[in-house]
Amino acid sequence: MKQVLTVSCKLQVTPEQSTKIDGTLQAFAAACGYVNETVQPTLMNELAIQSLVYHDVRAKFGLSAQLAIHAIRRVSGNRKTAKKDGKPVGSFAPTSATYDARTFSFREKDWTVSLTTIDGRERFSLAIGNYQIGLLKGQKPKTATLCQRKDGTYYLNIQLESTPPEPEKTSKVLGCDLGRTDIVVTSEGDKFSGKEITRIRECYASLRANIQQKATRGTRSTRRRCRELLKRLSGKERRFQELVNHTISHRLVTRTKLSNQAIALEDLTGIRERTNQLPHTKKERRLSNSWAFFELRQFLIYKAIKHGVHLVFVNPRYTSQTCHNCNHIHPVRGESYRSGKKFSCGHCGWNGDADYNGAKNISALGATVNAPEGSEMLSCSLSEHVLRAVESPTLAHERVA
Ligand SMILES: [Zn+2]
């Protein structure tokens, strides 16, 4: 099982080098565009496309052999994703190019990289901090992506491959219920409250609404300025949420690692259904359906894999409806012991936080699945979830800005 970590490194570029990079990025994008236009749209196989246009691409755009192959590979990849999404392949902007061991090398001695451009090989210093240095130390990266950001600066996103430690089997399972009011509630009763975050995001939302209103009434230049401001705000909000998610997932994973516990989560599709089922206001819907929710899941998953913490995915059916104390569900169809954040069992009389009750159920289900010596109680659907969790390490992907 491999995990890929992307380290984003700013390049120090002289004006002459900048011209060479720009030329390379433009040639790469132009080559992609050319391949996409000349080769019949139904052809997706990389080698098939290559056999048709490789020589043309090299002759027309002055790309090195490897860069030409990567341009073709990108078109092939984009076509495959486009087909999956049912959308046409978009245009290719001159903002990124793919590098591999033959076109890129990293030198730790002086923290530099050398890259093939359309005008020969160039060496660049990396403008990086201790964090990136720590990650790159002793590594021999084989792939990277050269990017130009909107502000004109150049970055090299270096991919590091690592094999995470094999997770230990354990019968101790920490159930995590991801929710709306509280971001996470664990089966040990820990809560990461979403109150403060919700408040800050609400501030952003009302600010946005305000600006939008101004934009519709204002002159042309006001409208343009408002658009720019909105863009900046959305970036700020996203980074804030990302930081919160990183912090929470990091704490949960280190804690379970130290106490040799596995982490149990609900299956993703189930969560989407559940949050959509509940009647809620427009405001709540914006919060629950947001990418933030799924981002936290993704962070939890890749950090768990990275640190060798076992992951269990449980069937989310009834985790919120069942009383963890006596395993009873409300006997009347359509009725529930749960009401918002409160859970009050009509059978044994247990009272408490509904998400805590959910987390307890997730933990209990996870423990059945994760029992070290086989598990006869395991239902088919549950074992599938576990397999899927183990087999999807491709999800795990970190970006270090
Ligand atoms: Zn009960």
Image (cartoon, rainbow, N blue to C red):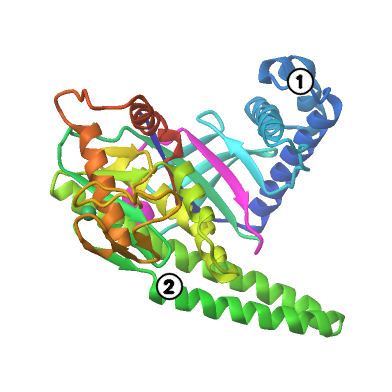
In the picture, the disc for residue 215 is: none
The amino acid type found where label 1 is placed reads Leu
Label 2's element? Answer: helix
Q: To which quarter of the image does residue 47 belong?
A: top right
The residue sitting at 71% across, 22% down in the picture is: 44
Look at the image and give the residue range highlighted in magenta.
131-151
- Residue 184 lies, with reference to residue 166, above or below; the image says below
Q: Nearer the viewer, residue 164 or 107?
A: 164
Ligand 1 rendered quadrant: bottom left
Quarter assignment of residue 166: top left
Q: Nearer the viewer, residue 355 or 249?
A: 355
Which residue sits at x=67%, y=21%? Answer: 46
Q: CA distance from mark 2 to mark 1?
A: 47 Å
Q: Is residue 169 magenta?
A: no
Number of other residues with Cα within 10 Å of mark 1, as a class: few under 14, some 14 to 19, many 20 or more: few
**Residue 200 position (above or below residue 340):** below
Label 2 neighbour load within 10 Å: few <14, some 14-19, many 20+:
some
Query: Considering depth in this image, is 64 or 177 the residue closer to the camera?
Result: 177
| Disc number placed over residue 197 in the picture, else none | 2
Q: Position of residue 149 (x, y in %)?
A: 63, 57
Using residue 179 as the reference point, say whether residue 75 is left or right of it: right
Q: How many marks?
A: 2
Question: Is residue 248 shown above or below 393?
Answer: below
Q: Is residue 235 found left or right of 299 in the rendered image?
A: right
Residue 292 percent across, percent down from the top left: 48, 59
Residue 39, image x and y in percent? Answer: 82, 23
Residue placed under numbered mark 1 in the picture: 43
Specify which label sits upstream in the sequence, 2 or 1: 1
Q: On the rendered structure, is 271 left or right of 154?
A: left
Residue at (73, 35) in percent of width and height: 86
